[in-house]
Amino acid sequence: MREKKGLLSFLKVDNLIDHLTDFIESKVEVFKMELKEELAALLSKAIVTVLLGLTASFFLLFFNIAIGYYLGYLLKNIFYGFLIVSLFYLIVFIIFFLLRNQLGLRELIEKKLNELLKIKSK
């Protein structure tokens, strides 16, 4: 054992091994810090997107309620106002459903998610 240590010491390989392990540990720490920074940036983008989506959803909800009430006021029956708004969204849904493959919405969403996550497409 002593001969092995003496030989490593003689060849100065022990310093090289120490420096190499320190270098690897440093690289691992840098990688961890970069990963934490990217995760924080991704989470902040996600939180902002969720907040914007939630705010837009509330606006759309109350705007549609207002339209339903207004149409109901014009037609002298609130039920008809909300029925018209609901039928409008049913028609929009049917159009999206029938044209889902032609519109390429899935591909567009996938592309945007890849850009957001910084994934290189093939």
Image (spheres, grey):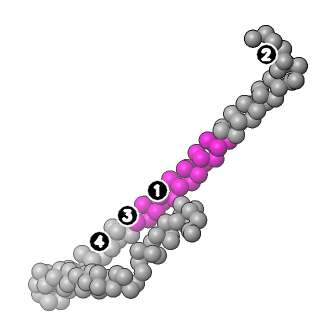
Does the magenta portion include 115? no
Amino acid beneath label 2? Lys
Q: Position of residue 53 (x, y in %)?
A: 40, 66
- Mark 4 to mark 3 CA distance (whole Å): 10 Å
Local crowd at mark 1 within 10 Å, few (<14), some, or many (≥20)?
few
Q: Nearer the viewer, mark 4 or mark 1?
A: 1
Q: Position of residue 12 (x, y in %)?
A: 86, 24
Tell which circle, 3 or 1, labels the residue nearer the N-terminal end.
1
Q: Nearer the viewer, residue 33 or 55?
A: 33
Q: Residue at x 57, y 54 (%)?
A: 41
* Mark 4 vs 3: CB contact within 8 A: no
- The residue to which callout 3 is attached is 54
Q: Residue at x 41, y 78 (%)?
A: 105
Query: In the rendered view of the protein, which quadrant contains the C terminus?
Result: bottom right
In this view, 105 is above or below 23: below
In this view, 31 is above or below 88: above
* Mark 3 vs 1: CB contact within 8 A: no
Amino acid beneath label 4? Leu
- The residue to which callout 2 is attached is 4
In this view, 57 is above or below 36: below
- Mark 2 to mark 1 CA distance (whole Å): 57 Å
The magenta stretch is 30-55
Q: Position of residue 37 (x, y in %)?
A: 60, 48
Which residue extends farthest bottom? 75
- The residue to which callout 1 is attached is 47
Which residue extends farthest right? 10
- Quadrant in the picture for residue 1: top right
